[in-house]
Image: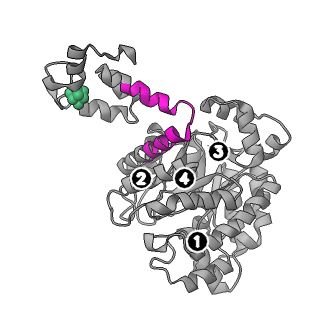
Amino acid sequence: MTQLELAREGTISTQMSLVAENEGVEVELIRRGVAEGTIVIPANIRHTNLTPCGIGQGLKTKVNANIGTSSDFGNIDTELEKLRVATSCGTDTVMDLSTGGDISAIRRAIIASSSVPIGTVPIYQAGIEAVARRGAIVKMTVDDLFSVIEEHARDGVDFVTVHCGVTQSAVEQLKQQGRVADVVSRGGAFLIGWMLHNARENPLYEYFDRLLEIARQFDVTLSLGDGMRPGCLADATDRPQIEELLAIGKLVSKAQQAGVQVMVEGPGHLPLDQIEANVQLEKSICKGAPFYVLGPLVTDVAAGYDHITGAIGGAIAGAAGADFLCYVTPAEHLSLPDPEDVRQGVIASRIAAHAADIVKGVKGASEWDRKMAVARKKLDWEEQARLSLDPELAHHVHSKHATAGKACSMCGEYCAMELVEKYLGISAVRC
Ligand code: SF4
């Protein structure tokens, strides 16, 4: 049985108990959320070394790190190093988006080494294998696609991005819309090319029941991908995007009825003032299913700094109710991320998630900040580093310049904290 089926019949699984413990909430809150579809626990029955993670309403905002090879670069060792860096920086999940090298071997090595849930986008491998075996992505058969999805499920993948909402109707909207950047989703592009060339409906939509059977067998969580997501601010919240979301809304209900856990992916590139509306639309149309946003990126012009662009959007989306933030690295739009890009991307996204958790009222979030404030007032540098999202960096920066007293080198003997304590007798003891 899937976590959803267990929750519905009133059973509390080991995974639900572990999620509750990690979140510091009652396990009944988790069971009810899973049963109602507002929480998912991506936990493939074959991912044996998994520490389960809950994503959804009432829980900490989660962060995903994308790793994986490209057709030009990458190998298993580099990807395992990225996995190590991402998890050591505190990512909640990792997606293997490999499109180069031995894709199956890389995926299996990542799953075997990972205690965090692993996600994939099977259409990548299906498309690449179609090129190798049949000469073109558009020659991929429906069976080719589903056999790759099943292979990922059998390998222990915990959640799969499947662009089921890219329907012929959404493609028609795309043609009429006159977008600036058209389609920026790789999976969406593979499918749209296939659908137009073959004049057929999206197989992931047409044979959704077949997908549900595989997902249910291994308890793979479906992450309904946004193949029509805007790839620039000018294309945000337009007709193809919303047409796809409407189709996804119907599929969410269908998946849940079949006992399959499901979440929904969202933009993409969005101006600041459209983020909240996009979260509300998803929550309303998809009946509260967990929302997994890709950034969102709030400007198109920050190449090299898109981890910051994504964190700004992620904080606002999270505060508005998004549950899961896909990180963006400084390499976004420019190159394949290396381990240092992964580190910066995870930390930036964790800052966004935590900022959102403070205003969401997530248990322990504000308390963490209060502890840091007390440590700052006490000039307790060890504690400040320990409480930092990136302790190593905090320690390194503080140690760069030696100081005469306890204060840091920013103000030295004119440290405001020390002066006020000395002359007004105000100390951190009261905090
Ligand atoms: S020296 Fe300045 S920056 Fe450093 S702890 Fe004191 S007030 Fe803060």
Q: Which residue is mark 2?
A: 312
Q: Which residue is mark 4?
A: 95
User: Main SS type for the magenta part?
Assistant: helix
Image coordinates for residue 413, horizontal then vertical, percent? 13, 23
Total numbered labels placed on residues in the image: 4
Q: Point out the stretch of residues depicted in magenta.
A: 349-373
Label 4 and label 3: CA atoms lie apart by 22 Å
Label 2 and label 3: CA atoms lie apart by 21 Å
Q: Is residue 370 magenta?
A: yes
Q: Quadrant of residue 376?
A: top left
Image coordinates for residue 104, horizontal then vertical, percent? 59, 57
Badge 1 element: helix
Q: Residue at x 52, y 47 (%)?
A: 319
Q: Amino acid at mark 2?
A: Ile
Disc 4 C-beta below 8 A from ligand 1: no
Instruction: Return the mark for residue 425.
Output: none
Q: Residue at x 31, y 35 (%)?
A: 393
Q: Amino acid at mark 3?
A: Gln
Label 2 and label 4: CA atoms lie apart by 22 Å
Closer to viewer: mark 4 or mark 1:
1
Image coordinates for residue 139, horizontal then vertical, percent? 64, 80
Q: Which residue is mark 1?
A: 241
Q: Which residue is mark 3?
A: 57
Q: Earlier in the sequence, mark 4 or mark 1?
A: 4
Q: Is residue 104 magenta?
A: no
Query: Can residue 14 be seen in this snapshot?
Result: no
The answer to the question of whether label 2 and label 3 lie on touching residues, with beta carbons closer than 8 A, is: no
